[in-house]
């Protein structure tokens, strides 16, 4: 049901946006702890090893214990309000744009709207549209997740005002270039691999085993998320490093800090000081998050679309009778 299907004209563009928002909300609540750990790993200059002097975080379980001991359980949902605004807004724009673009391809070109290449292009473009729309909220979420104790920003309003006054309006779009560069292939791979895996499962699973469609959506989404994240991870790390520029004083408790003058300078410094492995810091929690979030996004999106279709179909006979 992801993408325009001329044979199943059930979900409108507005309903796709509503289903995307709902799926984003549910997913964000569940995967927020992994996101916080991933961001902490990405922003740490020192190697993620207990043998490295000054390294605050060594691994996932050690990071969980340390964050819990130092900051409490709620630390795993730091920045949850801007993160929820991000997820709800991103989900709405992305799925609305994706449904519209695949429908446009079907109507004005000779390509099949269910083609995996079409899903790659439309998925990438829809994600770029959503990214530009919610980038300021993403920057706020990263700042909240990255700050330790004592807090620099007390709440969302305080963060917006402080960042605007001290760093200017452009600070809300820090890291946009690597984000756009990364999000197009990442989302493109998500949608195309999800489509490929769905088609593969249709061929491999016998008819009597196709009743568990929701589980299939979850598994296909999780696998698509792992593949996509692995292929595009370095850009995500660079984006996070650039987003906390101008915020170095709040990072002192986490170890070394660096100042990057832009995308190329960030790449050069990481390569020189941390080596190629530096571009993959935090990959483990990121893959866990990608599997969980992408699986849940597609699972809940398909579920909400099915519910909307069921409600519309149930309402149709009543309207005819009336």
Image (tube, rainbow, N blue to C red):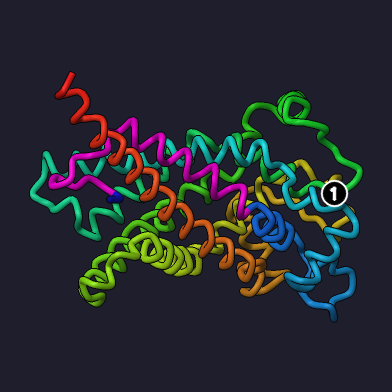
Residue 9 is a magenta residue: yes
Residue depicted at 33% across the width and 62% down the height: 213
Q: Position of residue 60 (x, y in %)?
A: 73, 70
Q: Position of residue 9 (x, y in %)?
A: 18, 40
Q: Give the prevailing secondary structure in the magenta stretch.
A: helix
Residue depicted at 58% across the width and 35% down the height: 85
In depth, the one of 248 and 57 nearer the eye is 57
Residue depicted at 57% across the width and 57% down the height: 236
Which of the 4 quarters of the picture holds residue 223?
bottom left
Q: Position of residue 72 (x, y in %)?
A: 86, 52
Report whether 76 appears left or right of 300. Answer: right
Q: Position of residue 205 (x, y in %)?
A: 26, 75
- Outermost residue on the left side: it is 110
In depth, the one of 265 and 208 nearer the eye is 208
Magenta part of the chain: 3-31
- Outermost residue on the top side: it is 322
């Amino acid at each position: 049901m992801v993408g325009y299907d001329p044979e199943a004209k059930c979900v409108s563009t507005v309903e796709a946006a509503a289903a995307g928002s709902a799926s984003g909300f549910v997913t964000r609540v569940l995967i927020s702890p992994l996101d916080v750990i991933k961001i902490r790993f990405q922003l740490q200059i020192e190697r993620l090893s207990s043998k490295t002097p000054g390294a605050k975080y060594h691994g996932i379980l050690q990071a969980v214990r340390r964050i819990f001991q130092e900051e409490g359980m709620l630390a795993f949902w730091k920045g949850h309000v801007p993160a929820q605004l991000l997820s709800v807004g991103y989900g709405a724009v992305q799925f609305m744009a994706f449904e519209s673009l695949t429908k446009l391809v079907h109507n004005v070109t000779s390509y099949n709207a269910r083609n995996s290449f079409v899903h790659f292009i439309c998925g990438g473009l829809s994600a770029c549209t959503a990214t530009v729309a919610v980038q300021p909220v993403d920057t706020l979420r990263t700042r909240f997740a990255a700050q330790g104790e004592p807090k620099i920003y007390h709440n969302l309003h305080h963060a917006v005002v402080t960042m605007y006054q001290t760093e200017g309006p452009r600070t809300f779009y820090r890291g946009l270039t690597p984000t756009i560069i990364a999000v197009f292939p990442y989302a493109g791979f998500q949608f195309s691999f999800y489509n490929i895996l769905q088609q593969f499962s249709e061929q491999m699973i016998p008819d009597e085993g196709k009743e568990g469609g929701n589980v299939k959506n979850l598994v296909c989404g999780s696998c698509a998320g792992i593949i996509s994240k692995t292929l595009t991870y370095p850009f995500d790390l660079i984006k996070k490093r650039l987003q906390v520029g101008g915020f170095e004083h709040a990072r002192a408790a986490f170890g070394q800090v660096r100042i990057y003058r832009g995308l190329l300078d960030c790449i050069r410094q990481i390569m020189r000081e941390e080596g190629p492995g530096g571009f993959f810091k935090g990959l483990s929690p990121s893959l866990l998050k990608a599997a969980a979030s992408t699986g849940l996004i597609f699972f809940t999106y398909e579920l909400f679309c099915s519910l909307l279709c069921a409600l519309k179909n149930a309402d149709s006979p009543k309207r005819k009778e009336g």
